[in-house]
C-alpha cells in the first residue's frame, strides 16, 4: 500500500512539474512571438524615419502577419502570467486595430502618423508586461531610453557649473542611466549579450558614462557635449535594434 501511495504521489509530482514547464513554455512562446512582431515593428519605424515608405509598408505587412499568428494562438488562451489581467485582451485587440490604422495612414501619405502608431504599439506592450510583472530586454531598453532622455537636458552650452545642483544632477542622472544599462546587460539572453552589436552599443555607452566624472570635475562643457551626443547615438541604436 505504501509503495502504491508513493508511486501515485510521484506521478502526481511529475504531472505538476510537466504542467509548470508547459506554463513557463507558454509565456516563453508568447514572448518569442511578440519579439518576432516587435522586430518587424522596429525595422518599419527605422524605414519611416529615413523616408523609405515602400520598405516600411513591406515590414508593416510582415508585422501584421506576425501579429495575426500570435493572436490566433494566444487570444483565447493567454499564458498563466496574464490570467485575469484586464489589459491582456484589450491590448491584443487594440494593437490589431492600431495596425489597421497604421496601414491606412501610410497609404494615405501620412508616414509621421504611421510612425507614431507603431511607437504606440511598443508602449502598449510595455504597459501590458509591466502590469503582469514581466520584464524583457525590450522593456529594459525602453527604460534606458527614458534614463538617457533625463541626462540629455544637460546638453546645454550655457551650463552653469557653479551650481551644485547642476553637477549633482549630471552625476545622478548618469548613475541612473548606467544602472539601467547594467540591468539590460543582465537581462539579455546569452546570444544577445555576447553579440558584437549589443556589446558595442552597451560597452560604448558605459565607456561614455565613465568619462562624465572627468567632465564634471574639470567643468568641461565641450567634453560633456561630446559624451552626450555619443550617448544619444548609442541610445537610439539600442532602441532601433533591441527596443
Image: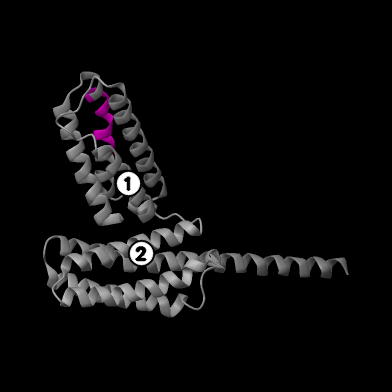
Is disc 1 placed on a helix, strand or loop? helix
Q: Identify the residue at horizontal 19%, vertical 45% (top origin).
A: 233
The answer to whether one can see residue 44 in this image is no
In this rendering, the label closer to the viewer, 2 or 1: 1
Left or right, 139 with respect to 205, comes to right
Most common SS among magenta residues: helix
The residue identified by callout 2 is 35
In the image, what residue occupies the spot 42% across and 64% down? 31
**Left or right: 102 with respect to 172?**
left
Residue 170 percent across, percent down from the top left? 29, 30
Element on which disc 2 rests = helix
Question: Could you tell me how far apart the alpha carbons at marks 2 and 1 are, in whole angstroms?
Answer: 21 Å
Quarter containing the N terminus: bottom right
In depth, the one of 216 and 71 nearer the eye is: 216
Seen in the picture, residue 22 relative to 179 is either above or below; the reply is below
| Residue 23 showing in the rendered view | yes
Q: Residue furthest right?
A: 1
In the image, residue 97 above or below residue 216: below
Q: Which residues are magenta?
A: 206-215
* Nearest to the observer: residue 56 or residue 128: 128
Task: Determine which residue is flagged by label 1.
Answer: 146
Quadrant assignment, res 211: top left
The answer to if 214 sits in the magenta stretch is: yes
Circle 1 residues within 10 Å: few <14, some 14–19, many ≥20: some
Query: Horizontal and vertical percent for residue 62?
Result: 26, 75
Instruction: Name the residue: 34% across, 37% down.
Output: 178
Amino acid at each position: 500500500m505504501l509503495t502504491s501511495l508513493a508511486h501515485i504521489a510521484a506521478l502526481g509530482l511529475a504531472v505538476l512539474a510537466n504542467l509548470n514547464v508547459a506554463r513557463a513554455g507558454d509565456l516563453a512562446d508568447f514572448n518569442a512571438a511578440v519579439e518576432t512582431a516587435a522586430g518587424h515593428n522596429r525595422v518599419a519605424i527605422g524605414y519611416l524615419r529615413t523616408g523609405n515608405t515602400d520598405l516600411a509598408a513591406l515590414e508593416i505587412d510582415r508585422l501584421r502577419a506576425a501579429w495575426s499568428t500570435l493572436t490566433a494562438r494566444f487570444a483565447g488562451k493567454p499564458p498563466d502570467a496574464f490570467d485575469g489581467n484586464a489589459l491582456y485582451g484589450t491590448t491584443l485587440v487594440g494593437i490589431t486595430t492600431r495596425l489597421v490604422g497604421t496601414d491606412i495612414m501610410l497609404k494615405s501619405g501620412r508616414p509621421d502618423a504611421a510612425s507614431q502608431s507603431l511607437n504606440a504599439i511598443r508602449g502598449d506592450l510595455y504597459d501590458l508586461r509591466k502590469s503582469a510583472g514581466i520584464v524583457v530586454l525590450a522593456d529594459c531598453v525602453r527604460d534606458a531610453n527614458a534614463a538617457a532622455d533625463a541626462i540629455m537636458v544637460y546638453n546645454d552650452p550655457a551650463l552653469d557649473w557653479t551650481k551644485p545642483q547642476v553637477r549633482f544632477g549630471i552625476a545622478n542622472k548618469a548613475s541612473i542611466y548606467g544602472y539601467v544599462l547594467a540591468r539590460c546587460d543582465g537581462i539579455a539572453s546569452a546570444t544577445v549579450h555576447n553579440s558584437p552589436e549589443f556589446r558595442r552599443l552597451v560597452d560604448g555607452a558605459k565607456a561614455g558614462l565613465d568619462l562624465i566624472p572627468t567632465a564634471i570635475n574639470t567643468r568641461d562643457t565641450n567634453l560633456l557635449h561630446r559624451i552626450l551626443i555619443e550617448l544619444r547615438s548609442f541610445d537610439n541604436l539600442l532602441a532601433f535594434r533591441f527596443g
